[in-house]
Image: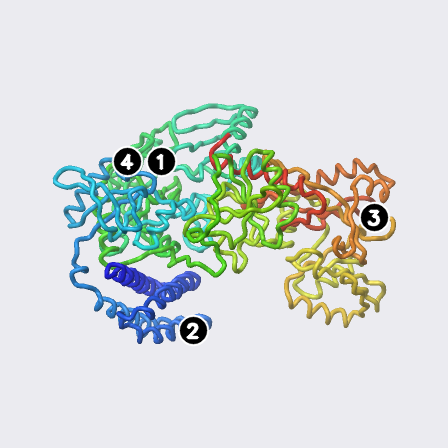
């Protein structure tokens, strides 16, 4: 019992230390007026304090309770002052109230710590989940770590997930004693230095459980796409990044090559310069260089290469213009800055050096045959009298960039490899940032800081857990450890899961099970309540004997997202948890801005002949301008579905404006309409659009719904196309509200007798395919389903795009067609994610 209590005390003390460190950084951010980052850190402080309050209040041994109400009041005061933007006052509160209160809280805990426990020998666990780290680290690095552990008076224990016994709180590990390796079983270490850093969703269950009870030294950065995105969003150091595009289809490559004749293809998850390709286009010839391997391709050969090498791993490559950074001798080079936190928890420049490649290569990586030398002599040779200035600038940049990156990642980073470059014009660039940089020629220098920082974490009880993120069971949330449900014994076939709301288990869900069975893959559905985040298990529902049967199942290979609530309040946790698993849709929310879609489509100039004239409404005057110009207009909210809030406005004479909203019809004069519109646009953002007379021969409003989905080859195809006929003046009614649908060709023949119905249908199909392709090239997010609403002008039978919907298009009587597309595309994503061809 004493051990359990001591561990609880230690964990609480760990968080208090982290709170103190975070508050110090919060103070710095306030002084520097970094308001957005300050709010982020303050949120972490609030969450951390809430995490320890309950344990303090429930523990009779702890005497710090009296301080809790004061800290609560201070935090509330900071929050209110933040809202007012009074940064000077916040600085005063932090310096004279909040920081002293946290330190007093820490003193109370230290009083309860056994002095013998404080002075004990520190045990550092070196951990790799899948196998012993001695098999994963270079021998030179292992030897350097062991040597430093002796010099710094700590013990190292190398272990994997298979060596952990949670019930006894022990590990069985390799340790170096008396000049030989032995296996020992010991109680849990004081700190874990983890290698092979993974995102949370990729971590084993053992690693997740260890992270809940022990401090870890290392946390991830993300891939070559997510990190630059975070940097740009922060507003600092974005100018150092070389522009890039993630390649999701061939059109992105073609468009990029129009503007850039020298480019580089890089894998998003690449390391050590592997699978990087340099391309130069000259005289219709494509010169491709991979390290030292050079080949000259024709247009046809290049097309094949893009298709088989780049697009077969869709979304796994990015494209950048080539920035030439070469020595006077024509050798490619960059500057590697290796930074680490030291024994005081402060960033230090462990080593900075040039990496110089072969003249015939574009790569400078030492692992790819490059070389290195002393930075000072290198700069003197390359820049002469300016050498010292370049050296000072690049060292300062390395440290400034490191501090900033650490802030962006919750102050949890411990080690980075920054790849910086200087082009022929003297401009500085940031090529990459790596979590675990290679240190072939300075393993001992690295080991000094690795051991010292781990020791610092243990001695000071600093507990970094992704901004204090601790998952606790919510009432009604699935608990895999205390369930009587059977476990699903699934074989190695792909596992496709549908994420769905409990109220939407319908014919589509059933149809997916039949299609999945035909495609020979596993399928189940689950809701947000069905996930056990700690155990990484799901309560999945399998369709057996025409009924849904709940079973415990592992996370799937791909998620068919029918919930579509990414980014919405209350659903952040589930999407963060499942990050790393391919989703069929990555858009935020279940509806995107119509204005954003219109603007993006218009920006290309490729669809100008089918886009209805529109304008964002800034003033009531904008609406009247459109009415004056076109006579009849549509006014609709920027975001929304099902024709909610859509107004039809028609000027019938100087004193009469007719307005229809669904069934409601009203007449206004110019003054009363202006007053109504002025109040309306206060409620949100609206778009005004020319009205297209899209009516049947019976004078009913209609549109053509084209439901587009990606198939098993990632090509856009038609799930369905049908007319939707309304019963109101100008908007389409759903079938549940009296509207009805029909068959496309028969509908066109009856209502547009002057044109060929088949040719008109083909023209609509062409518009749909072009729209999908254009939108896909404009959005970096993955999506696989669109609903296009097409109008056909009654006067000349010309089709126009009314709207593009990326939410869940309604499905009426064609669930199997949707299921066939959804499952086939999910299988495609699974194969790509597993590196299958």
Q: Give the camera-side residue of 56 and 361.
A: 56
Judge from the rendering whether residue 829 lies leftward or rightward of residue 12; answer left or right. Answer: right
Q: Which residue is mark 4?
A: 135
Helix, strand or loop at mark 4:
helix
Q: CA distance from mark 1 to mark 3?
A: 61 Å
Left or right of 645? Residue 260 is left
What distance separates the C-alpha of mark 1 from that of mark 4? 19 Å
Identify the residue at horizontal 71%, vertical 57% (top origin). Answer: 643
Which secondary structure lies at badge 1?
Answer: loop
Relative height, residue 394 to residue 328 (above, below): below
- Would you name the residue on which mark 2 appears? 81
On screen, residue 12 above or below 429: below
**Of discs 4 and 2, which sits in the foreground?**
4
Residues under labels 4 and 3: Cα distance?
A: 73 Å
If you read the primary sequence from the N terminus, does the residue marked by circle 4 or circle 3 appear first? 4
Q: Which numbered disc flags the more N-terminal residue, 1 or 3?
A: 1
Q: Earlier in the sequence, mark 4 or mark 2?
A: 2
The one nearer the camera, 29 or 443, is: 443
Residue 22 in view: yes
Distance CA(mark 4)–CA(mark 2): 53 Å
Q: How many marks?
A: 4
| Earlier sequence position, callout 1 versus callout 4 | 4
The percent coordinates of residue 345 (x first, y second) are 26, 56
8 and 633: which is toward the camera? 8
Q: Is residue 189 left or right of residue 232?
A: left
Other-residue count near label 2 (Cα within 10 Å), few / some / many at <14 / 14–19 / ≥20 = some
| Residue marked by disc 1 | 272
Does 416 sit left or right of 707 as displayed?
left
| Helix, strand or loop status at disc 2 | helix
Which of the two discs, 4 and 3, sits closer to the camera? 4
Q: CA distance from mark 2 to mark 1?
A: 48 Å
Q: To which residue does mark 3 refer?
A: 794
């Amino acid at each position: 019992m004493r051990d359990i209590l001591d561990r609880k005390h230690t964990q609480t003390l760990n968080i208090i230390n982290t709170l103190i460190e975070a508050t110090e950084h919060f103070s710095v951010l306030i002084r520097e007026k970094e308001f957005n980052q300050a709010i982020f850190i303050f949120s972490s402080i609030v969450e951390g304090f809430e995490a320890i309050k309950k344990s303090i209040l429930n523990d009779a041994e702890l005497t710090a309770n009296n301080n809790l109400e004061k800290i609560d009041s201070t935090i509330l005061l900071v929050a209110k002052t933040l809202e007012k933007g009074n940064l000077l006052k916040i600085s005063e509160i932090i310096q004279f109230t909040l920081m002293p209160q946290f330190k007093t809280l820490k003193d109370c805990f230290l009083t309860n710590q056994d002095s013998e426990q404080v002075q004990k020998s520190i045990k550092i666990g070196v951990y790799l989940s899948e196998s012993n780290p001695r098999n994963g680290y270079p021998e030179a690095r292992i030897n350097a770590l062991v040597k430093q552990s002796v010099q710094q008076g700590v013990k190292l224990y190398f272990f994997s997930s298979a060596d952990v016994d949670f019930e006894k709180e022990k590990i069985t590990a390799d340790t170096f004693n008396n000049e030989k390796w032995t296996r020992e079983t010991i109680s849990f270490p004081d700190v874990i230095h983890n290698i092979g850093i993974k995102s949370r969703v990729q971590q084993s269950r053992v690693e997740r459980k260890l992270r809940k009870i022990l401090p870890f030294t290392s946390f991830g950065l993300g891939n070559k796409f997510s990190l630059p995105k975070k940097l740009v969003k922060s507003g600092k150091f974005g100018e150092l990044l070389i522009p890039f595009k993630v390649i999701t289809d061939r059109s992105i490559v073609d468009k990029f090559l129009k503007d850039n004749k020298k480019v580089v293809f890089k894998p998003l998850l690449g390391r050590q310069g592997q699978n990087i390709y340099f391309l130069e286009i000259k005289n219709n010839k494509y010169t491709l260089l991979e390290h030292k391997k050079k080949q000259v391709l024709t247009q046809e050969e290049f097309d094949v290469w893009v298709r088989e090498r780049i697009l077969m791993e869709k979304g796994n490559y990015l494209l950048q213009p080539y920035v030439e950074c070469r020595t006077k001798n024509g050798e490619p080079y960059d500057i590697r800055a290796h930074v680490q936190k030291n024994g005081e928890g402060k960033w230090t420049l462990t080593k900075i050096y040039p990496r110089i490649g072969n003249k015939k290569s574009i790569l400078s990586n030492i692992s790819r045959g490059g070389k290195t030398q002393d930075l000072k002599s290198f700069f003197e040779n390359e820049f002469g009298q300016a050498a010292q200035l370049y050296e000072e600038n690049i060292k300062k940049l390395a440290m400034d960039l490191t501090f900033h990156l650490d802030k962006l990642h919750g102050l949890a980073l411990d080690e980075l490899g920054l790849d910086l470059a200087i082009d022929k014009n003297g401009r500085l660039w940031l090529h990459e940032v790596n979590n675990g940089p290679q240190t072939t020629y300075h393993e001992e220098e690295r080991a000094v800081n690795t051991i010292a920082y781990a020791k610092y974490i243990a001695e000071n009880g600093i507990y970094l857990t992704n901004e204090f993120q601790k998952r606790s069971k919510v009432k009604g949330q699935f608990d895999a450890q205390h369930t009587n449900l059977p476990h699903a014994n699934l074989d190695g076939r792909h596992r496709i899961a549908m994420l769905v709301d409990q109220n939407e288990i319908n014919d589509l869900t059933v149809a997916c099970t039949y299609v999945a069975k035909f495609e020979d893959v596993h399928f189940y559905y689950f809701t947000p309540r069905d996930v056990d985040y700690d155990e990484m298990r799901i309560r999945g529902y399998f369709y057996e004997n025409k009924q849904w049967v709940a079973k415990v199942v592992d996370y799937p290979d791909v998620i068919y997202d029918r919930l579509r609530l990414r980014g919405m309040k209350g659903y952040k946790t589930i999407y963060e948890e499942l990050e790393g698993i391919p989703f069929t849709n990555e858009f935020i929310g279940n509806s995107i801005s119509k204005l954003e879609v219109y603007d993006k489509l218009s920006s290309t100039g490729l669809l100008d002949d089918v886009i209805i004239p529109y304008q964002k409404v800034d003033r009531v005057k904008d609406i009247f301008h459109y009415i004056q110009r076109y006579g009849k207009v549509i006014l609709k909210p920027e975001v929304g579905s099902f024709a909610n809030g859509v107004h039809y406005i028609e000027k019938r004479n100087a004193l009469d404006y007719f307005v229809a909203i669904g069934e409601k019809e009203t007449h206004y004069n110019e003054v009363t309409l202006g007053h109504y519109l002025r109040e309306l646009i206060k409620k949100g953002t609206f778009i005004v659009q020319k009205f297209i007379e899209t009516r049947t021969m019976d004078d009913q409003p209609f549109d053509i719904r084209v439901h587009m989905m990606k198939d098993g080859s990632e090509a856009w195809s038609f799930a369905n196309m049908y007319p939707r006929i309304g019963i109101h003046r100008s908007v389409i009614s759903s079938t549940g509200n009296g509207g009805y649908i029909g068959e496309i060709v028969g509908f066109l023949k009856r209502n547009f007798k002057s044109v060929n119905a088949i040719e008109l249908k083909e023209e609509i199909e062409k518009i749909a395919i072009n729209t999908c392709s254009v939108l896909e090239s404009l959005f970096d997010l993955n999506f696989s389903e669109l609903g296009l609403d097409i109008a056909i002008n009654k006067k000349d039978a010309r089709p126009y795009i009314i709207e593009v919907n990326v939410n869940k298009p309604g499905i009426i009587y064609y669930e199997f067609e949707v299921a066939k597309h959804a499952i086939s595309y999910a299988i495609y994503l699974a194969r790509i994610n597993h590196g299958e061809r």
